[in-house]
Image: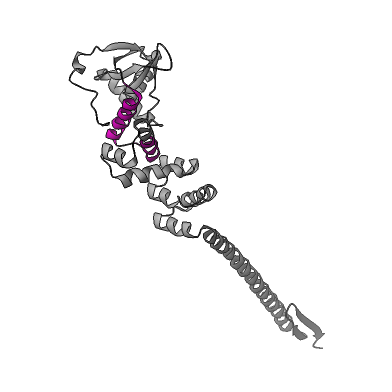
Amino acid sequence: MPLFFGHKNKNEENKQVQEIEIDQIVPNRYQPRRTFSEESIAELAQTLKEQGLLQPIILRKDKQEDGKYEIIAGERRFRAARSLDWAKIPAIVEDMDDAKVASLALIENLQREDLNPIDEAQAYLQLMKVNDLTQTELAKQVGKTQSYVANKIRLLRLTPKVQSFLVSKKITQRHGRALLNLNEEDQDRAVSEIIKRGLTVKETEAMVEDLDGYFAALAEAETQPDEKKKAKKTKKQIIKTGNDFKVQVNTIKQAIKMAKESGLKVKYKEDQQKDSYKITIELFNKN
């Protein structure tokens, strides 16, 4: 079944636009987009406030709840209108099966080209299920290569933690694919390191090749500076102690010199050891 069908067919102009109450509308359960930018919704709401709704949203009767309508296309417009506290919104009610609804929801979002990779992967998986398609068939339908679709779907094997960093764009898809060879625990450990140190894709790939070795080397590298610092501090203390002896000895010798100049006869003996410095002083009157 072709996915790229047009919901704006030649008879659409003759379809009646209805005013549907906002409270009667439920989101599209096949909506691939899990997150909506509050900023973009606010911008669209401002446009609706100034210009009104230029294109009605598309709905179908909800199969799960009587009296409700499910969004087929136009969820951003719906959310913007709801943020303005509209009571009703212009809509066209279509009769459409699940496969077409899922297909149209994906196509609408792909045309915007800002789906995050996880939402896109989930959408491809859902399209394959509802339309009973292989990856190759789906790729042909959506105008992508089979490898493109396969690489997107593989991202769903990443842990929720890694996926969240992909969605927030803290890591790239290439980072994500590099982590696929790791088990779940190691994926989470590795992605934390990527975020902490800002690792490039190349650095990430090198880390993944020997993850335990990477962290072992990292631990060793982090302890070495402490040992060097400690050794340096000890050496500094020894040097300082030596300098203290020298200062004190010079002070004593200066006192001996002053005693001699005052008329006293002075004899002194020095005995320097490794950890001590002994000075014996004898004072005599010249008379």
Q: Position of residue 64 (x, y in %)?
A: 43, 17
Does the magenta segment cover residue 216? no
Does the magenta segment cover residue 98? yes
In depth, the one of 254 and 182 nearer the eye is 182
Q: Relative to residue 156, is residue 4 drawn left or right?
A: left
Q: Please name the predominant secondary structure of the magenta segment in the image.
A: helix
Q: Quadrant of the C terminus?
A: bottom right
Q: Position of residue 3 (x, y in %)?
A: 27, 31
The type of colouring in the image is one colour
In depth, the one of 262 and 252 nearer the eye is 252
Range of residues picked out in magenta: 96-125
In depth, the one of 198 and 30 nearer the eye is 30
* Residue found at the far bottom of this picture: 287
Q: Relative to residue 166, is residue 225 drawn left or right?
A: right
Which residue sits at x=76%, y=84%? 271
Which residue sits at x=20%, y=22%? 9
Give residue 11's quadrant in the image: top left
Q: Relative to residue 10, is residue 271 drawn left or right?
A: right
In depth, the one of 96 and 93 nearer the eye is 96
Q: Position of residue 167 (x, y in %)?
A: 41, 39
Q: Quadrant of the N terminus?
A: top left
Above or below — where is 160 with respect to 206?
above
Give residue 212's quadrant in the image: bottom right
Above or below — where is 249 with respect to 142?
below
